[in-house]
Image (cartoon, coloured by chain):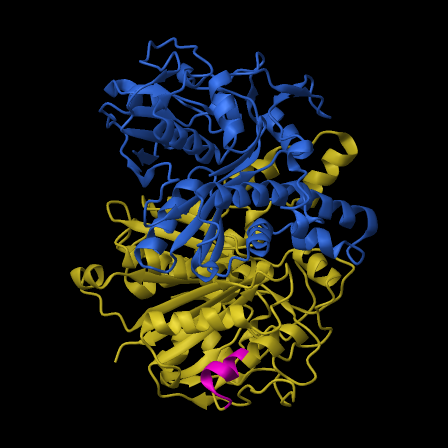
Chain colours: A yellow, B blue
Amino acid sequence: MGAISAAGGDIAETLECFAAGRRNLGKVTLFASSLDYPVFEVRRPFVYSSKYKSRTIQLVLTALDEALAGAGLDRDMSGRRVGVCMGTTVASQLNDVDFYQSYRKEGAAGMEPVENFLKGNLAEVVSAELRATGPAVTVVNACSSSSDAIGVALSWIRNGICDLVIAGGGDELNRIPLCGFGSLSVFSHKPCRPYDRDREGLNLGEGAGVVILESERSARARGAVPGLFVAGYGAACDAHHLTAPRPDGSGLETAVRGSLAEAGVQPSEVCFVNAHGTATRDNDKVEGSVLARVFGTDAKVLSTKGYTGHTLGAAGALEAVFSALALREGWIPASAGFENKDDEIPIGAVRERTAITGQYAVSTSLAFGGNNASLVIGRCS
Amino acid sequence: MGIVFSRGRGIASLEQALQEGWVPPSEVEVRGLDSRLPVYPVSAETLTDKAVLAKARRADRFVRMSVLAASDAIQDSGLAGSLDKQRLGVIIATALGPHVTTFNFLDGIIDFGDAAVSPTAFSHSVHNAAASYVAMTLDVRGPTLTMTHFHFAFHDALLLARAWLDEKRCDSVLVGAVDELGTVMEYACGRMLKPAKDGRIKPFAFSLSPEAVPGEGSVFFLLTRETSGAAYAAVEPGDFTPGSFPAGSGLLLTDNSGMSGDESGYRVAVAGGMQAASYMPVFGSIMTGSAFQAAAGALVVKRQMRYACPVQDNPHCVNICSETVAGPVSNVLCLRLDCRGQGRTVRLMH
């Protein structure tokens, strides 16, 4: 596993940040904007390679290196059935303001931004870096992109399409989503407070999370001893609204129950839920109601967005990594920003670092377009 | 299947286009380009269907093309009344996404500033807006996924659909592709591609710098585990190893259309002697063009009809299909190569 976000440049730093309850929030420095909402920016210098212009690619390759090292794998994957499935939002769009402004004003523009865009498909880049020859897919499912990417990877492994899949996602802080989410009035001027009664909205963040999924046979063949696994994936569409979740949460409930059924896991076996928990009024209310219905009102729930902000296409992968880390380490951090339970939500979040002893965790994602995704992460007993 | 392309909407339009063959493209004046650009755009009239688009009234062309093709695919399947919408999935492949709306959103930033942009433009600029509208229109409650790749997005969409069906995640999957043309993309095409001055994509020229006629559209397939009476073909996505030669009595369709640079690799692929054709000159140059070619291939299999190549320039004397003839076609192999020589196939079987 590999992770980079405002919470830390790698897994060790991230765990330290979680343990300390630190929230690295501040003004955006990467670009100019008249919007002064606080953001979770990766401040650590991390330029991976001058070969790539895209910050998202730099973030993903940084997390990829950590994941490969942790799995004891080389960068050269040629000769193996290796797939790549990455989620993103920003990196999929040709949204260079300077390029477009130049074309609008002058009727001409340099083609370099377009060329960079055409060379910058996230999965294609990772696949080329690893000399992988399996399928390479960039999932663009808005905020559930990288949860879905991990779900796709699971399907590839289970169906024998690949022996090993590099899965995850990344997104950089960018002016376009800052303006876009700003126009939807979903930002908070303060540090976000997922699930809290007084929550005012989300903070934008950036980062990348990468996991390496491998078939048991492939892992055994190279002498690897996996400690964690993806046990199940569920996905369902609300078919309701482009930006708002279905009020009854039935799409999310289908996704969560589907992931549990696929994993063969009962809700009572799940020791915590890493919720999507954006800290918007709608998301937390709908999601909290669903989690209470499935897991009961005493379930341990947290949102790590209090440490990372909403990292959009990276969120699902980062949160899957954080969930797996918690299972491995035996504790979950306090759900940063949560103080007061909301009477409209039948479930609260954990207020302090909490020991966990179970074998399974669930990580949920909701997205524009009505996408709902749920991953069941397991720890080998 | 359902299709929206420059020659119209629906299977009848596709069949008519394959029977008629090549027609001259439109030519558009593009700001910043010295000469007019040949293009195959989808007409505005094609995208006016108030009944089907009732839930997409505020949506852009990218969404409208998708919703119409997806809805038509369901109708064409004859399964509309029996599909379990909870068990129906959607996978959409796109190379460039709804870039026209993305640029509209940038207009807002440039003209009005960061704090005064349109939330509607933003929410429609995300790649999965089309999948969302398809789901809302057809009440799809299963998994919906949008994926992007500049060469093999459609092939990977098929591969995933097959996996979803095999692992019983879904009973049926709507797999589609959509890409659009807009002013900025026309400018980029004019600068980065070699527009065909005579308006003809020449798939069998196998050129190092092939000519293109940018196109747009959407095509959807309803895939199920079981074969129904309305089925076109069995579908099998696969890999193509450079240097191997497709052989047999079927039909080889090459997906090259001037969008991916050097097309000389296709010359090796046709050396096996399998009769070849390419219907890309009917659709235009589209990054997800393999999906449109697969639709043509599916019709070949269903009708047991080899349609003549719409453009028959054939300097390398390939065994191409030069006239439309009825006769047995056991399988059609659609081949796509990328600029690195990697290849993917879609096999369609009777």
Seen in the image, is B244 located left or right of residue B342? left
Across the whole image, how many numbered discs are drawn on residues? 0
Residue A127 seen from this side: no
Which residue is at 28% across, 59% downward?
A158
Q: Nearer the viewer, residue A335 or B254?
A: B254
Which residue is at 75% across, 29% downward?
A107
Residue B224 seen from this side: yes
Q: Nearer the viewer, residue A246 or A227?
A: A246
Q: Nearer the viewer, residue A194 or A28?
A: A194
Seen in the image, is A176 located left or right of residue A330? right
Check the image and report above or below for A62 versus B179.
below
Q: State the image coordinates of residue B298 (x, y, percent, origin top left).
A: 39, 32
Give the quadrant of residue A233: bottom left
Which residue is at 40% across, 70% downward?
A259
Q: State the image coordinates of residue A182 (x, y, percent, origin top left).
A: 73, 62
Look at the image and say whether residue A294 sits in the magenta stretch: yes
Seen in the image, is A27 located left or right of residue A236? right
Q: State the image coordinates of residue B255 (x, y, percent, origin top left).
A: 41, 28
Magenta region: which residues? Answer: A290-297
Check the image and report above or below for B185 versus A34.
above
Q: State the image coordinates of residue A104 (x, y, percent, origin top left).
A: 76, 35
Magenta portion: prevailing SS class: helix
